[in-house]
Amino acid sequence: MTLLSNKRLSSIAELDAQRKELLSSRAPSTKSVYVCTGPGCAAKGSPKLYELFREAVSQANVDVEIRAKAVGCHGLCEYGPIVIIEPGDIFYQRVEEPDVAEIFRETVLGGRLVDRLLYEHPATGEKLDTVDKIPFYQVQQRVALAYNGLIDPTEITDYITEGGYSALAKVLSSMTAEEVVSEVEAAGLRGRGGGGFPTARKWRSCREAEGSPKYVICNGDEGDPGAFMDRAIMEGNPHSVIEGMLIGAYAIGSSDGYIYVRNEYPLSVERLKLAIEQAKELGLIGENILGSSFSFDIRINRGGGAFVCGESTALMASLEGRPGEPRAKYVHTVESGLWEKPTNLNNVETWTNVPAIINRGGEWFAGIGTEKSKGTKVFSLVGKVVNTGLVEVPMGITLRQIIDEIGGGIPDGKRFKAVQTGGPSGGCIPAEHLDARVDFDELTKLGSMMGSGGMIVMDEDTCMVRVAKYFTDFLQKESCGKCTPCREGLAQMLYILDRITDGEGQVGDVERLEGLAELMEGTALCALGKTAANPVISTIRYFRDEYDAHIKEKHCPAKECRGLFRYEIDADACKSCGICLQNCPAEAITGEKKVPYVIDQEKCTLCGTCWEKCPFAAVLKV
Amino acid sequence: MPTVTIDGCKVTVKKDETILDAARKAGIWIPTLCYHPAVPSDASCRLCMVELDRGDWRQLVTSCNYPVRRDIVVYVSSERAEAARRGVMELLLARAPESGELKALAERMGVYETRYPNVTESQRNCILCGLCVSVCEQIIGKAAIGFAGRGVDRAVAAPFRQPSEDCIGCGACAAICPVGTIKIRIHADEQEVEISPFKSRAKLLVCEQCGALVASKQVSEQALTRSNLNSEEFRASLRLCPKCRRLQTAGQLGAATFYKK
Ligand SMILES: Cc1cc2nc3c(=O)[nH]c(=O)nc-3n(C[C@H](O)[C@H](O)[C@H](O)COP(=O)(O)O)c2cc1C
Ligand code: SF4
């Protein structure tokens, strides 16, 4: 269905006409099958499902138009692969290859439900047939991900039909550069890449900076482990990023753009490339866009492969072909950035919000959220929650709502312990602050941060010292090593954390960690080093007792640190089956028929085999 | 011209001069390691931290590359600035415990020991300030050495950690190294100069008169091209060691008899 015959649109009127044509051609009876090909579902084999649906479409000789589409992430990745059938908004989860024929026959052609594939309400067990009934989606509000899963990212016509590029048209036809900046200012949009810097202020400084050319960059480096918010946007709705950049470039006075995409995201690169190509063919990128005097070109660069390359100055060094290492920012990048020219860098999600703000108005956007944090935020919800996946929530929602209502609570009846937000240099927030709101400043006050939207939920079995060690280790490996406090400080911290979790912690180690943290925060060159102590500091702040237990009692309360807990056999639960004895490689277990077995602590090497093998869960960690 | 008030002392500097420039003008000492006027500041050692007054708060900044653009107030000997500098120095002492130069600088700052153990050693006694890398690339024009690895594994090395073909044996890196880690070794019997720890070697010129070792051949060549004194007469003079050259010049001036007596 290619209505746009690669014809360059030379005016806004032509764009509008195309959209009208596309809309009217969309038959109301059209049936669609949406197959999620976001990262989560794709990993579970959804591309194959997509192929199978396409085959089914081509084989079925029916006169209704059926479109099988590969679309971006729906969230709720835990239940993937996800398939949605229109009309009716029927939601099928955990779809496997053999289910395709049945869905096609029953639902697509017959209009009947396949009960077995419906989502079950986690609390009531009730089968829910449509998307809007599922609690996971009820609490969410989608702006950045609004069209993820609805449009085919490989078809610019889909984006245009849904109103895409109308914000650009509006800007070009009726707004001055300053009016655009003011609209974004009224929206209260703050950067989604980590720092939460007011976007309009950055744009204005860049616009007012002396020097030309000016550059506009999209940061798609997304290096946080386990995060894929930006990836989902780049792959699910690449045109929204491009349209945002076009609007920003118009406001700033730039005609050169770069998208810096993480090296591990080949599909993002492919989708963006295709999107740019399609936009160029239509004259939405290039010279004299839509007949105006505004020209803009976008190039794609693949990332340098290191986490620190996502830092603004390192990213620019990498774009220039130099090693991706940060430099001092006493002179801001908006004044002297890429090739020492004024440069405006924003995150993928920041850019994506821009068209919506222009279309619906800054006031609308500012109506969502808290006093100083406006709009929505996408999070990658992972860890010990029932539902994991991408979620987009209005700012101001509580952490509890995200974890319980969207995440479906903690699995296996375990207790919640902490939620880590903000990526590797974020912090851990304990149960007593679960009613804190998702808000840049509130999360910072709690010793964590918004970051780019990682959210890892931990249950009672998680040792918080180990959590701190895990992130410190990650950051130590990712530190570029340029400046003393980050390079040496992280190594010293890790050395101390290692000895604490090995049971060799010394009294005063917590204070040593605090001292290093203060030093790094004050003296490191870039934000990686300045914030690298957050995981340690926030766990000391909320879980000091766990540090003390490791250091003073040589005991790991969560029983994760080997050597800092014992295995014992619960005499009441032991059925004297002898399985533990047979499996113990250290011959540390004794016992006989009808008498509970016992572990000889002297001989026990703490390998944990008995704990794993006991069929009656009679082996306990104490 | 903006005024910098450092610990209450006022100095004016040109726009975009640094806080360190201002402090030096005012005669106030700020310890530095990775700073050298010959090369641009990278501010990687973080030793020159001072506190900048931001109105309702104070920010720690590196004085060596903070450009002064308007009137500012700076504290060099505030408690926080001193603690920051000492903390950085302690980390460096843990990394390079055997450097006498580093120890001397530490003592001048009032740091007599470090509370940290030696846990990082990608390169013995190297503090990774990067001055050697900068001088080789930007002044000598060779880039025979560079950074390899990242994080704690970062090290200064020649490509593939092999003796570099590009090294001309000039010793600029050794001269600029603030902790005495890079050394020039003369192998008299082989008439070679070695730059340690990079193991690169260069042949030395031998004085035609007395047989003393002079600079390396490449250094001599580079000096000639750079100095625009590429005449045969000047070239001839470079084939002598400095002492013999003085004697020759004196002889040419007709002072030989006077000199010999
Ligand atoms: C170590 C480090 C890694 C970063 N990685 C990213 C990243 O992957 N993506 C991103 O958008 N911002 C990242 N940032 C933040 C950027 O430096 C920058 O602030 C951001 O891209 C600005 O965009 P915004 O104002 O739209 O948030 C990182 C910062 C640091 C210090
Ligand atoms: S803080 Fe860390 S990552 Fe940043 S410049 Fe220093 S060593 Fe590199």
Image (tube, grey):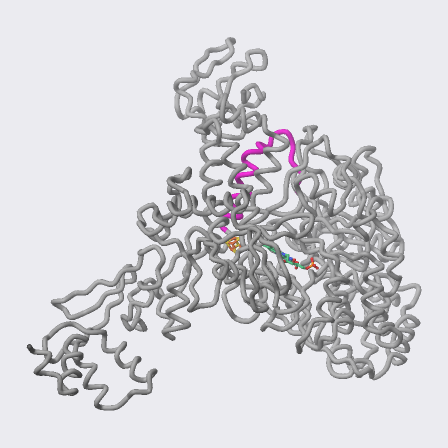
In which quarter of the view is residue A70 placed?
bottom right
Nearer to us in this view, A28 or A235:
A235
Q: Is residue A461 magenta?
A: yes
With respect to residue A98, does A285 lie above or below?
A: below
The x, y position of residue A217, in whole percent, is: 67, 68
The x, y position of residue A495, in whole percent, is: 45, 39
Nearer to us in this view, A45 or A297:
A297
Q: Which residues are magenta?
A: A456-477
Is residue A341 visible in the rendered structure shown here? yes
The residue located at (75%, 56%) in the rendering is: A190
The image shows a total of numbered marks equal to 0
Is residue A305 visible in the rendered structure shown here? no
The residue located at (68%, 53%) in the rendering is: A195
Q: Quadrant of the C terminus of chain A?
A: top right
Per the picture, the main secondary structure of the magenta-coloured stretch is: helix
Q: Quadrant of the N terminus of chain A?
A: bottom right
Q: Is residue B210 left or right of residue A273?
A: left
Judged from this view, the residue extending furthest toward the top is A595
The x, y position of residue A450, in whole percent, is: 70, 47
Nearer to us in this view, B189 or A14:
B189
Nearer to us in this view, A451 or A38:
A451
With respect to residue A275, does A138 lie above or below?
A: above
In which quarter of the view is residue A61 placed?
bottom right
The x, y position of residue B221, in whole percent, is: 27, 81
The residue located at (86%, 68%) in the rendering is: A163
Judged from this view, the residue extending furthest toward the bottom is B232
**Ligand 1 lies in quarter:** bottom right
